[in-house]
Amino acid sequence: MAEEVSHPSRYVKLTKDQAPMEDIKPGELNQPIDVPQLHVRKCNECGQPLPESYQAPADEPWTTGIFDCAEDAESCKTGLFCPCVLFGRNVEQIREDTPWNGPCICHAIFVEGGLAFAAATAALHGFIDPRTTFLICEGLFFGWWMCGIYTGLMRQSLQKKYHLKNSPCDPCLVHCCMHWCALCQEHREMKARLSDDAIMPMTVVNPPPVQEMNAAGDSRESASTSANGGEQVHVEMQAL
């Protein structure tokens, strides 16, 4: 019969002196334990864990200034005469899942439409009651501030994407005070970082030629030269 080997228990039984029962309170053993090894830094955007040696990139300056609109004549003309189109293109590049026509229409209704309504109110100043004019101007200022907040959020998304500094101040305040210059600067920044004219080198690899193996001729020659003169065997091998 096989001898039974008794292994000592891995658990240690505490005595009454080591763990007094009166010191243990109900629920004390179910408290969470703080384990420093489980503290992992995660990315604020995607939630993926980051290595311990990771350091957040520093904020970079813009490639062009806020008043350097003349450096890109195309965006300067588009931003001056059709800012809604330029804003739609910027949003489309920042958010790839958003087509440009939606932001363009919203910009045309609230910004260009608000400016046209303000000009019409100023032209009809003597024909409109002053109190009504004051309410209209107050509503236009409120609408302009809301548009500045919306366009500033787009600028903030661009800064977060490329780690850009606030230039020259808060994004919403930039669009409220220098809306057209801000649109041109954002378009130049994305054009400089995602240039469509950049040609990436490509390596063309040609596949090897298809090789076929046919042993029909060799089998016929070996069968005809057999010494016993027996029955000839024809073997054909075809490539699958």
Image (cartoon, rainbow, N blue to C red):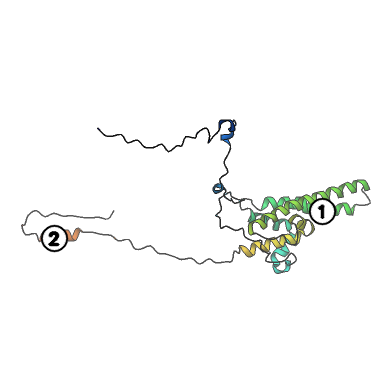
- Residue 176 percent location from the top left of the image: 78, 56
Picture layout, residue 24 above or below residue 220: above
Question: What kind of residue is marked 1?
Answer: Ala
In the displayed structure, does residue 218 sit left or right of residue 23?
left
- Residue 30 percent location from the top left of the image: 57, 35
Q: Could you give the CA–CA distance between mark 1 and mark 2, rounded to whole angstroms?
A: 97 Å
- Residue 81 percent location from the top left of the image: 75, 61
Give 13 or 184, whichever is nearer the viewer: 13
Q: Who's the residue at 6% across and 59% down the image?
A: 227
Q: Secondary structure at mark 1?
A: helix
Question: What kind of residue is marked 2?
Answer: Ser
Q: Total label count? A: 2
Q: Which residue is mark 1?
A: 116
Residue 222's label in the rendered image is 2
Give 216 or 21, whichever is nearer the viewer: 21
Q: Who's the residue at 75% across and 51% down the image?
A: 149
- Name which quarter of the figure residue 2 lies in: top left
Residue 145's label in the rendered image is none
Q: Who's the residue at 69% across and 55% down the image?
A: 156
Q: Residues within 10 Å of mark 1 (few under 14, many from 20)?
A: few
